[in-house]
Image (cartoon, coloured by chain):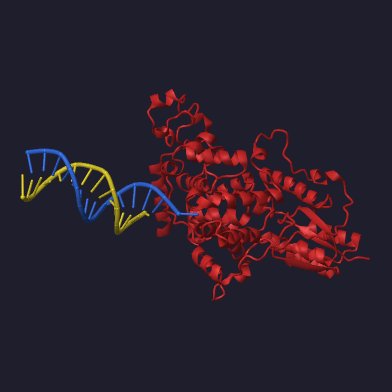
Chain colours: A red, B blue, C yellow
DNA sequence: TGAAATGTTGGGGCG
DNA sequence: ACGCCCCAACATTTC
């Protein structure tokens, strides 16, 4: 009788370049398993957009596996033990996860399964460089990005030839019904009005298509174009990476290949790779500083007088701040489950500095809305903007949403797309309608406070307020 | 992967 | 021709 083994899929919903899957298949008849984990801490359960994505991604994976994906919901420790018993499988493979609660969970499961007599092998399918390989010479983790990046490029492993989709895919037939994925209840209810589905197609093949398209078009102007929210110069691979529909190794490998063969410019390739390494840096940070997800990395911010302003938070969430670039970003997020990176920085600066609301509130809202919500990237990036993080922007670096808007959405097309009520406002006043002459707005069909809100705060005043608070905190 | 305040320079208008 | 002022353009400092 053939050896049976389990490949436990978690955040690696793909066949290509999947070390755990390849290892399992090499070992014997493989049971591809996904578990919707009951143990995920409540505050980090997926929001509706991510659940929608997960549903689609599982359907796609199941399809690639000829309908043989085993799908379960509950406590993975019990489920794995049960399946081992039930099938007589003798080993389990998975790709490592790095969130603090996942590490604790996996450690426990490994012990239980080993005690049970099964072998357990974990693999690296989610990162280029695992945290324990990126330490400084003195054995401590990097807290600054640039040295992390530079050292990494010279010392860490280069992307390796991606693993192929196992061709001799011996899968154990799944005994369950077809609607097992639907039974997870990941899809939203009837009131769902967000046009996420028209914006995105989850799944491994679309992840590959997106990368291919990016390497053909977007990357050629990446260095400049990545800051223009209305231009398609960014890869938009983030949700695919988050669910592991594509591996960072595969992405880095393709970029390197294209650069080596001079299909793309070296400089553009570097800038894009740099962003991939930011992701690695974030993973290293939460691995060594697991409290980053809930607490300021910089301890001197402990006493910072964040304002608890429910009303302001709500207005920000709804995209009704009266600053068009902020509102456009927040509405893009709500409607599409995504926000362009430049705009993420602008809205985050606005929330944490102009409104002086704690970054954790912003992180939670993003977590709820984003299809690419990733605990490491989300926590570290929020802390970066707020000035509380590792190698963060200094607190006094406060974005002016009007200036940023003029600079990066100079023709206003991003604003007009997501804040359609302002479509007829002439470009001269589009970035800051609250300071436009009443008559000009009226001609565009806008009365402030009716069709579009008046700015909720004064930029100059709130900037000063934030700086004073920052100074006050430092003097303690 | 800022912005505002302040400082410096240099050209042009003008008496 | 010269000094003076204005101010844009750029540089530096500060938050």
Counting from the top left corner in percent of width and height, residue A210 is at: 63, 49
Q: Position of residue A251 (x, y in %)?
A: 63, 58
Extreme residue toward the bottom, this view: A138
Towards the viewer: C1 or A150: C1
Q: Is residue A470 above or below residue A289?
A: above
| Residue A245 in the figure: left or right of residue A217 | right
Residue A202 shows in the view: yes
Marker count (numbered): 0
Residue A394 appears left or right of A92: left
Instruction: Check the picture and name the quadrant holding the C terminus of chain A.
Output: bottom left
Residue A340 x/y as whole percent:
54, 46
- Which quadrant of the structure image shows residue A232? top right
Relative to residue A14, is residue A314 drawn left or right? Answer: left
Work out whether residue A462 or residue A168 is closer to the camera in this orientation and state it.
Answer: A168
Which residue is drawn at the image coordinates 50% and 27% (left, top)? A451
User: A159 or B9: nearer the eye?
Assistant: A159
Say which residue appears at 85% left-offset and 68% top-offset. A116
Locate residue A263, reporting x and y percent: 56, 56
| Residue situated in front as seen by the camera: A364 or A434 | A434
Residue A331, picture quadrant:
top right
- In the figure, A138 relative to B8: above or below? below
The answer, for residue A317, to whether it is visible in the render is no
| Residue for point 94% across, 66% down | A1
From the viewer's perspective, is residue A318 above or below residue A103? above
Name, please, the residue furthest toward the right.
A1
């Amino acid at each position: 009788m053939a050896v049976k083994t389990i490949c436990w899929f978690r955040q690696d919903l793909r066949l290509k370049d999947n070390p755990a899957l390849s290892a399992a298949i090499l070992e014997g008849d493989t049971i591809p398993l996904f578990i919707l984990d009951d143990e995920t801490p409540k505050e980090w359960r997926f929001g509706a957009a991510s659940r929608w994505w997960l549903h689609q991604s599982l359907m796609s994976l199941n399809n690639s596996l000829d309908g043989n994906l085993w799908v379960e919901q509950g406590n993975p420790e019990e489920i794995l033990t049960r399946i081992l018993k039930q099938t007589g499988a003798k080993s389990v493979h998975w790709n490592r996860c790095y969130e603090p609660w996942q590490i604790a969970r996996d450690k426990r499961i490994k012990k239980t399964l080993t005690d049970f007599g099964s072998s357990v092998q974990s693999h690296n399918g989610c990162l280029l460089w695992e945290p324990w390989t990126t330490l400084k010479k003195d054995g401590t983790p990097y807290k600054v990005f640039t040295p992390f990046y530079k050292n990494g490029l010279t010392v860490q492993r280069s992307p390796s030839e991606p693993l192929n989709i196992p061709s001799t895919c011996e899968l154990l037939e799944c005994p369950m019904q077809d609607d097992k994925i639907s039974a997870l209840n990941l899809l939203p209810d009837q009131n769902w009005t967000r046009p996420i589905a028209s914006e995105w197609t989850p799944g491994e093949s679309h992840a590959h298509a997106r990368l291919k398209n990016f390497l053909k078009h977007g990357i050629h102007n990446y260095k400049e174009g990545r800051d223009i929210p209305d231009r398609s110069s960014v890869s938009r691979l983030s949700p695919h990476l988050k669910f592991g529909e594509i591996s960072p190794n595969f992405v880095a490998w393709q970029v390197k290949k294209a650069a080596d063969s001079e299909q793309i410019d070296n400089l553009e390739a570097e800038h894009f790779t740099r962003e991939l390494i930011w992701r690695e840096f974030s993973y290293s940070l939460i691995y060594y500083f697991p409290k980053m997800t809930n607490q300021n990395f910089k301890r001197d911010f402990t006493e910072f007088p964040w304002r608890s302003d429910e009303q302001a938070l709500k207005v920000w969430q709804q995209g009704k701040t009266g600053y068009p670039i902020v509102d456009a970003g927040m509405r893009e997020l709500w409607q599409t489950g995504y926000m362009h990176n430049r705009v993420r920085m602008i809205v985050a600066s606005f929330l944490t500095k102009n409104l002086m609301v704690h970054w954790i509130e912003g992180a939670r809202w993003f977590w709820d809305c984003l299809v690419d919500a990733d605990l490491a990237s989300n926590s570290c990036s929020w802390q970066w903007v707020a000035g509380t993080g590792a190698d963060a922007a200094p607190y006094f670096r406060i974005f002016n949403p009007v200036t940023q808007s003029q600079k990066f959405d100079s023709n206003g097309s991003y604003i007009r797309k997501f804040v359609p009520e302002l479509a007829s406002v002439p470009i001269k006043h589009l970035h800051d309608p609250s300071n436009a002459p009443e008559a000009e707005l009226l001609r565009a069909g806008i009365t402030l406070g009716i069709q579009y809100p008046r700015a909720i705060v004064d930029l100059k005043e709130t900037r000063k307020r934030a700086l004073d608070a920052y100074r006050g905190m430092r003097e303690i």
